Image (cartoon, rainbow, N blue to C red):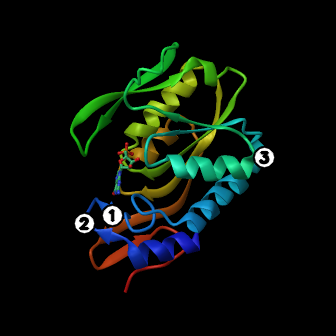
Amino acid sequence: MKELQERIIRDGKVLSASVLKVDAFLNHQVDPQLTMNIGKRFAELFADEKVTKVVTIEASGIHFALATSVALGVPFIYAKKKKAVTLTEEVYSAPVHSFTRQETYQISVSKQYLQAEDRVLIVDDFLATGAALVGLTQIVKDAGAHLVGIGAVIEKSFQEGRGLLEKEGIRIESLARIESMSPEHIHFIEPAATRV
Ligand code: 5GP
């Protein structure tokens, strides 16, 4: 997605060889028009899949799930990272290991909102190690629902996430695929757009 790639080049900050800061428009301050366009793009990509639910994980996936679900006209669910006192019903849960924080936490979704008849599109901000998305796919599997695919806003293709999920036969659509990056240069897999 050209608009997204250009924005990453303009406002993204490469903090290290593996960490891209996008707080200016995506992850802290949020550009609403870009977010809605991202949602529309995911909806177009999965238009033929008869999606019934969009699923993400709190917090940084929520606005993309909202934009996608508005475009598709279906509800979205965000998996919770901590078991809230209001989450009194039965839940599907899965462990997620955070490599950035070096800790494992449980994510959960109420069994009430995810059914075997559902056709699920998972969306998230980043596909990096894939740990968060693997946790979400586990929850969809446990519910007996059909996973139509994953939409990642930014993929760091040099990390192992895509390989891990593709091994499971999962369709992945990433709107910006970063092949390599440094503070001076971000190289996308396609179409060519680089920081000069
Ligand atoms: P995972 O490693 O499980 O694929 O990514 C987990 C989460 O870590 C992502 O959803 C995202 O919120 C965060 N994350 C991973 N890599 C980056 C990065 O380079 N920059 C930012 N801002 N967040 C990241």
Q: Amino acid at mark 1?
A: Lys
Asked whether 19 or 77 is in front, the reply is 77
Foreground disc of the pair 3, 2: 2
Asked whether 109 or 161 is in front, the reply is 109
Looking at the image, tell me whether mark 2 or mark 1 is earlier in sequence order: 2
> On screen, 7 above or below 47?
below
Q: Which residue is mark 2?
A: 15
> On screen, 184 above or below 33?
below
Looking at the image, tell me whether mark 1 or mark 3 is earlier in sequence order: 1
Q: Mark 1 Cα within 10 Å, few/some/many (few <14, many 20+)?
A: some
Give SS at disc 3. Answer: helix
Residue at image position (37%, 63%) is 23
Q: Tell me residue 83's x, y (percent).
A: 39, 23
Find out if the beta carbon at label 1 lies less than 8 Å from the nearest ligand 1 atom.
Answer: yes
Q: Which residue is mark 3?
A: 48
Q: Amino acid at mark 2?
A: Leu
Asked whether 170 or 33 is in front, the reply is 33
Q: Are marks 2 and 1 in contact (CB under 8 Å)?
A: yes
Q: Which residue is mark 1?
A: 21
Residue at image position (49%, 47%) is 61
Foreground disc of the pair 1, 3: 1
Give SS at disc 1. Answer: strand
Q: Are marks 3 and 2 in contact (CB under 8 Å)?
A: no
> On screen, 87 above or below 167?
above
Q: Label 1 to label 3, Cα distance in Å?
A: 33 Å
Find out if the beta carbon at label 2 lies less than 8 Å from the nearest ligand 1 atom.
Answer: yes
Residue at image position (56%, 52%) is 64
Looking at the image, tell me whether mark 3 or mark 2 is earlier in sequence order: 2
Residue at image position (56%, 24%) is 141
Q: Amino acid at mark 3?
A: Asp
Q: Tell me residue 163's x, y (percent).
A: 44, 45
